[in-house]
Image (tube, grey):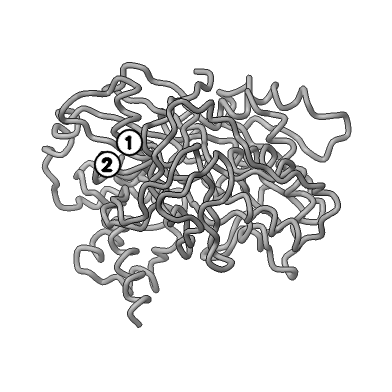
Amino acid sequence: MAIRRLPFAPRLIVHLSQQVGRPARPLVKIGEGVVRGPPIAAAEGFISVPHHAPATGVIEDIRLHATANGPWGPAIIIRVHQGSTQEILWEQPQDLTALNADGLIKAVQDTGIVGLGGGVFPTHAKLKVPKEWPIDTLVVNGCECEPYLTSDHRIMVERAADLIAGITIAQQLLDGPRAIIGIEDNKMDAVEAIRKLLPEGSSISAEAVPTKYPQGAGEMLIKTLTGREVPPDARAYTTGAYVQNVATLATMGALMPRGRGFIERVITVVGPAVEKPGNYLVPFGTPLRFLLDCVGARDASLEVVFGGPMMGQAVASLDTPITKGVAGILVLRGREVAERQSRKTYPCIKCGECIESCPMGLNPSTLGMLATKRAYDTMADSYRLGACFECGSCTYVCPANIPLVQHFRVAKQMLRNKEKTA
């Protein structure tokens, strides 16, 4: 469905940590008035991004607030002026062609853009590829293979010019590689929308690739488009290929020439409990409860997932706000989730289905058994736990109903906690 704008909530909750890295530092004070657009929190170091005012209003508070995964984090609360037109009133236009590499990296950081394919790693930091690894191919990921989600599809159809502009900026930063946009062949309208805007002889091309899950994984798409295999535990750029999501690049193309901040994104809101599903342009900080009310999801026993059914994360509280990393919202009724949860888990029967389904060639069965024994170091050192990108295929096919990918997520978190305390 075509992109529509969601109404502005009476209050927006802008979390200061919406990305991998350090939380941003507030630039505003309680009681201060803000217009839509300027920065309200500054980046704290290189692996951090600023945040901008998503609406015109007044800073009501700066305090801890609930996050999607449970822990509370610092946030700026904006009381929105309901009578405002919510026009963007702040921008700093710039000539990007006149900037050197460091200037472009700084311009990307100033927008506050993070990876919109799910990784939420600061985009400017990802674009700083080591000089010893020259990039000859920019792989643009338009494979929205997660069930239900269609926001990237609509961006490619409706905002193809912004996407091409963003690709051009990335090419400038990466010393002019060719760019291939990989789009699943069930989205040929997106392929045609992009091809219409490409001049003859362009260094950018749009290619249709087979529709299958998880085609949208960076390693999978690199192999499909270039034939190159990313070595185990290696970065993609070591193959000469660099991957970026279409939504990330389209956002760069729309914001950077104008010098605007990243204050909203297109989100697919869908599921059996949603009366008005669709792709909505949602300001960051919009409370989840307000959004669900707007789309007609009013069931008292809702279960909400940020993302899709395969790789999404269950939301701990309906009071959590929308952040930069939310590409989709799947809304289920409580009874549907209870039916799935009521299925009994059995011991592994060594059928090998999970091994066959794993796109990274891992052994999920062995990893799962090690996880139950809390042998997390062995999982990482001997069985390549870090190569798992949590696609959920192993859990989906397991006849014993073992929640394998959930075990792996716990293992990774325990290893991260161990590193922090070391």
Query: The residue under label 2 is which amino acid type?
Result: Asp
The reply to whether dot 2 and dot 1 touch (C-beta < 8 Å) is yes
Going from the N terminus, do you reach mark 2 or mark 1 first?
1
Q: Which residue is mark 2?
A: 319
Image x and y of residue 358, in percent: 41, 49
Mark 1: few, some, or many residues within 10 Å (few <14, many ≥20)? Answer: many
Q: Is residue 6 placed above or below 46 in the rendered structure?
A: above
Residue that protrudes farthest toward the bottom in the picture: 422
Seen from the viewer's position, the closer of residues 127 and 97 is 97
Mark 2: few, some, or many residues within 10 Å (few <14, many ≥20)? Answer: some
x 42%, y 56%: residue: 388
x 51%, y 58%: residue: 27
Q: Which residue is mark 1?
A: 288
Image x and y of residue 44, in percent: 53, 66
Q: Quadrant of the C terminus?
A: bottom left
- Under tag 1, what secondary structure? helix
